[in-house]
Image: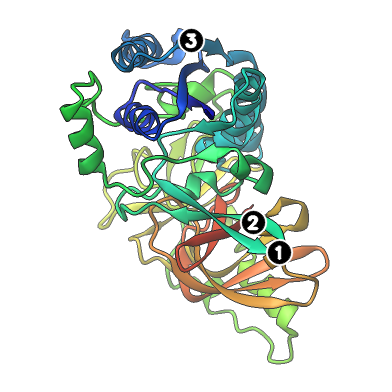
Amino acid sequence: MKRVVVGLSGGVDSSVAAYLLQQQGYEVIGLFMKNWHDDSVTISNECPWLEDSNDALLVAEKLGIPFQTVDLSEQYKEKIVDYMFNEYEKGRTPNPDVLCNREIKFDVFMKIALSLGADFVATGHYCRKTELEINGETVYQLKSGADGNKDQSYFLCQLSQEQLAKSLFPIGELTKPEVREIAAQMDLITADKKDSQGLCFIGKVRLPEFLQQKLQPKEGLIIQIDKNDPIYSFNKPDNLTLKENLIAASKHFPYIEQMGKIVGKHQGAHYFTTGQRKGLNVGGTTDPLFIIATNVTSNTIYTGLTSQHPGLFKKALKIENEEVHWIRNDLALANGERVEYMVRIRYRQPLQKATLYQFENAMYIEFDEPQSAITEGQFAAWYLEDELIGSGVIS
């Protein structure tokens, strides 16, 4: 009998995952990860992880499976929280959920599970795993969840073949309503529980307050750039090579404060991200202001009116070679190669048609249609139909 350790988070998805595995004849062990213990930055006085671990325990008792809690808060702080502070300080916007899966759930946690004699680790993610045989070797495929509204394959875009080999996603073929239905039939305490929000496992944390513990507020200017600024009508020379064109298309606009008008002040450019609309507290504009760029060196935020402002859109992005990750190593591009895939640059974004170009030191992704708010530090993930092929950090 194969042994599976399920990461029981205290939510409905992982509860049903554990139940389904039990039905499939696995020996199931429930493990709750405690990743956060600094209550000074959770918003309210409720203690989400305590409530969640309690719910996880009740589900384990109901199913009659062994249960324990593992405290990973030190590794979490070092691998996720410190990394996040560093990224924000550089003016980038990291994705903690993708990192948490790569560094914690499918690494630290997986090692603990395997040390307990587990054959597999299972989570309540909405995605599917299938396998192929290529030249006598088993190759694992990571596919979108069957529920188009809940597909979470994007959050697993940094997993490796080794990690996938040991992973199970029992609810990947189900929709959220079906999962809730099963939980209700089984009378699991989590059946009607709302989906968790906030950082992966940190609980209900407001990001600016969270960041303010490490990154000191410092006042800077909010500049508004006119949509007809000459910077947007700059004509590229005709004789550029393909690579020069891609470099130009993925480059940031070189804003300086003199280009626009001062419309307000902010408390630190590193608290803000491209495409953001809320939290600027600038009134009196005809249309909503969107952040089109931040500069943490000069501590300036550049904004533009409406979601259609030309400063929000770019046709290409760049990924440094060491940040390019292939789930399907057999499909990795060699220097000089190109391929068409469907790409998303954030969770829940509909897939976009694009071409990947691999050069000696970097990969460029050129989209058929200009994309809004391509954000440094976020992950671009590329798909072939419903299979996630690879991903990388936008530079």
Query: Which amino acid, mark 2?
Result: Val
Q: Could you tell me which residue is drawn at 67 percent across and 22 percent down?
A: 78
Question: Which numbered disc flags the more N-terminal residue, 3 or 2?
Answer: 3
Question: Residue 43: x and y, percent?
Answer: 36, 17
Question: Which numbered disc flags the more N-terminal residue, 1 or 2?
Answer: 2
Query: Which amino acid, mark 3?
Result: Gln
Name the residue that disc number 3 marks. Answer: 68
User: Disc 3 versus disc 2: distance between alpha carbons?
Assistant: 32 Å
User: Disc 1 versus disc 2: distance between alpha carbons?
Assistant: 9 Å
Q: Could you tell me which residue is drawn at 57 percent across and 40 percent down?
A: 94
> Residue 49 or 266: which is nearer the viewer?
49
Question: Residue 384: x and y, percent?
Answer: 52, 68
Report the mark closest to the observer, 3 or 2.
Answer: 2
Name the residue that disc number 1 marks. Answer: 330
Q: Secondary structure at mark 3?
A: strand
Give yes or no for contact between labels 1 and 2 (Cβ–Cβ under 8 Å): yes
> Residue 82 or 269: which is nearer the viewer?
82
Name the residue that disc number 2 marks. Answer: 139
Count neighbours of disc 1 (C-alpha within 10 A) and say few if under 14, some if 14 to 19, many if 20 or more. Answer: few
> Residue 137 or 151: which is nearer the viewer?
137
User: Disc 3 versus disc 1: distance between alpha carbons?
Assistant: 38 Å
Q: Secondary structure at mark 1?
A: helix
Question: Residue 179: x and y, percent?
Answer: 25, 38
